[in-house]
Image: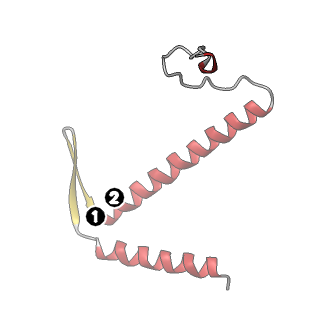
């Protein structure tokens, strides 16, 4: 097996151990809602949400990159709000 595959299997095994050790029920309170669920469900949900956000961010980045490659105007760069310095220091 490749080292990358072995590393992935070890990480997955450790993740499974962490999940099984965190089966205690918790109360997740958000504003005026309270949901009771096992901690490992919350861990998996947050992981899935992070993967989904990262995936959408990657798609948006690649879409912008393709658009700029086709000649679309680039995004405006942030400005400092200062006027450019036009004085010539060498004449003093």
Frontmost residue, 30 versus 10: 10
Residue 36 lies left or right of residue 10; in this view the side is left
Q: Which quarter of the image is occupied by the C terminus?
A: top right
Residue 50 horizontal/vertical position (percent): 46, 52
Dot 1 corresponds to which residue? Answer: 38
State the residue at coordinates (49%, 22%).
80
**Residue 67 or 16: which is nearer the viewer?**
67
Q: Residues within 10 Å of mark 1 (few under 14, many from 20)?
A: some
Residue 1 in the image: above or below residue 92: below
Classify mark 2: helix, strand or loop. helix
User: Considering the numbered disc 1 on the image, is that residue within a helix, a strand or a loop?
Assistant: strand
Q: Are marks 1 and 2 in contact (CB under 8 Å)?
A: yes
Give the image quarter of residue 39: bottom left
* Quarter location, residue 16: bottom left
- Residue at the spot 29% in from the left edge and 71% down from the top edge: 22
Check disc 2 and report the residue beneath it. 42
Identity of the residue furthest to the right in this view: 70
């Amino acid at each position: 097996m490749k080292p990358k595959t072995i590393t992935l299997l070890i990480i997955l095994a450790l993740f499974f151990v962490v999940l099984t050790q965190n089966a205690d029920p918790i109360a997740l309170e958000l504003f005026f809602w309270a949901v009771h669920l096992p901690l490992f469900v919350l861990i998996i949900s947050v992981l899935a949400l992070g993967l989904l956000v990262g995936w959408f961010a990657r798609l948006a980045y690649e879409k912008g990159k393709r658009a700029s490659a086709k000649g679309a105007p680039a995004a405006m760069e942030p400005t400092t709000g200062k006027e450019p310095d036009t004085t010539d220091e060498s004449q003093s």
